[in-house]
Amino acid sequence: MRRSIDYLETHYAEPVAIGKVSAIAGLSELHFMRSFRAATRIPVHSYLTRIRLGRAKGQLSRGVGAAETALRVVFFDQ
C-alpha cells in the first residue's frame, strides 16, 4: 500500500488511473480499492483530492493564481 500512496503523492498533478495504482500495489482494482479504504479510512479518489487540495492551498498561499493552480494540480477535470 505504501508504494501506491507514494505514487499518488508523486503523480497527483497527472490524471491517475486506478488500474495503474492497483497494479503498483499488486492487487486487482476492486481488492485495491477495498484495501486502500481499509488502510486509510477514505476512498482512493478522496485521498487524491486531499493531496491536490493541499498542494493547491500551498500554491495559492505563494501567490499563484487560481486558474494556474487549478491547472497545476489537475482540478480542471473535476
Image: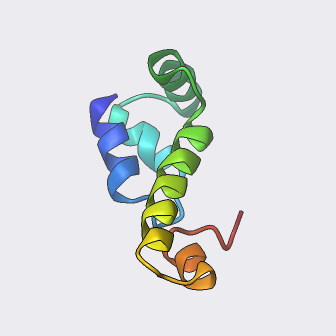
- Give the quarter of the figure containing the N terminus: top left
Classify the position of the C terminus by image quarter.
bottom right
Above or below for 20 versus 73? above
Is residue 55 rendered to the left or right of residue 49?
Answer: left
In x, y percent, where is residue 39? 44, 18
> Residue 1 versus residue 63: which sits nearer the camera?
63
Q: Residue furthest right?
A: 78
Left or right: residue 56 versus residue 76 is left
Judging from the image, the colouring scheme is rainbow
In the displayed orientation, state which residue is furthest to the top: 38
Q: Quadrant of residue 41?
A: top right
The x and y percentages for residue 26 are 35, 31
Front one among 23 and 11: 11
> What residue do we see at 60% from left, 43% from top?
45
Residue 46: percent from the left, percent from the top? 61, 40
| Count of numbered circles on the image | 0
| 3 lies left or right of 60 | left
Image coordinates of residue 76 in percent, x first then y, are 67, 73
Going 47% across and 23% down the picture, which residue do you hit?
40
Establish if 57 lies above or below 17. below
Q: Give the residue displayed 29% in from the left and 31% down from the top.
A: 2
Kindly indicate the quadrant of the structure image that contains residue 68.
bottom right
Which residue shows up at 49% across the image and 76% down it? Answer: 72
